[in-house]
Image (cartoon, coloured by chain):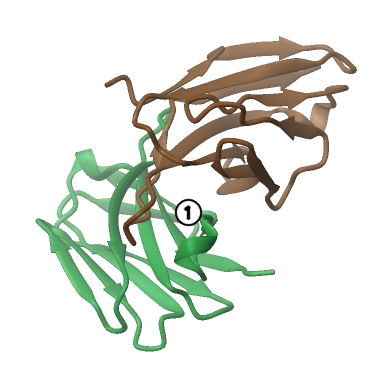
Amino acid sequence: NAGVTQTPKFRILKIGQSMTLQCTQDMNHNYMYWYRQDPGMGLKLIYYSVGAGITDKGEVPNGYNVSRSTTEDFPLRLELAAPSQTSVYFCASRSTGTHYNEQFFGPGTRLTVL
Amino acid sequence: GQQVMQIPQYQHVQEGEDFTTYCNSSTTLSNIQWYKQRPGGHPVFLIQLVKSGEVKKQKRLTFQFGEAKKNSSLHITATQTTDVGTYFCAGARDTNAGKSTFGDGTTLTVKP
């Protein structure tokens, strides 16, 4: 299993540009998450999904959009990029059906907005 | 909203010394997880605590969950250079809600 994969690894955007961060997991997990991590800080939840077709806002959703058309994929869309969105973005997934909350993280996408 | 605070933010130790990080939640938790993130890497799950007063050990690491289920700690005995990284706690109020709130982490550096 590849686990959680993210593309791209790095990206530089100009202010006002848009892009989609891709996230795919092959563990058949229902729960998926998008976090951002600013330097020296913890993980802030942007959006999450409890299954295909269902998404919900986290702590910091402004400026982002998500969709979940399949169990495997959970892309994050940035519209009108701003310097405040410079961060490292992590996608994560976890299984349901147990009370075990282990989240599996992807390697991250390092985004710079200039 | 729920807040999870971790202290200290940074800890520098000599190899062989012990290390402890503390996690405090503003609300009672259903469970708490601990993750480790190596420099430049992604968070990796270490353990989950569920029961009030629970204590779990993984080799030199000891994890505790407070009686009131609002605080937790991670203690490393005799640190090694391989312990370097940032340790995060993540608390969930409701297991079925699907989300946890992460603390800001404690970054551990170990001097050989």
- Residue B23 x, y percent position in the rendering: 44, 69
- Is A11 on the left-hand or right-hand side of A19? left
Residue A5's quadrant in the figure?
Answer: top left
Residue A17's quadrant in the figure?
Answer: top right
Residue under the point 56% across and 79% down: B27
Q: Is residue B112 visible?
A: no
- Residue B57 x, y percent position in the rendering: 14, 64
Residue under the point 46% across and 41% down: A30
Query: Regarding mark 1 in the picture, which secondary structure is present there?
Result: loop
A54 is higher (above) or lower (below) than B27? above
The kind of residue on which mark 1 rests is Gly
B74 is higher (above) or lower (below) than B39? below
Counting labels gives: 1
Q: Camera-side residue: B87 or B70?
A: B70
> Label 1 belongs to which residue?
B105
Q: Is residue B67 visible?
A: yes
Shown in brown, the chain is: A
Classify 10 Å Cα crowding around label 1: few (below 14), some (14-19), many (20 and above): many
- Residue A95 x, y percent position in the rendering: 37, 45
Residue under the point 37% across and 55% down: A101
The extreme bottom residue here reads B67
- Residue A94 x, y percent position in the rendering: 40, 44
Q: Camera-side residue: B26 or A27?
A: A27
B70 is higher (above) or lower (below) than A93? below
Q: Which chain carries label 1?
A: B
- Is A107 on the left-hand or right-hand side of A22? left
Shown in green, the chain is: B
Residue under the point 53% across and 74% down: B25
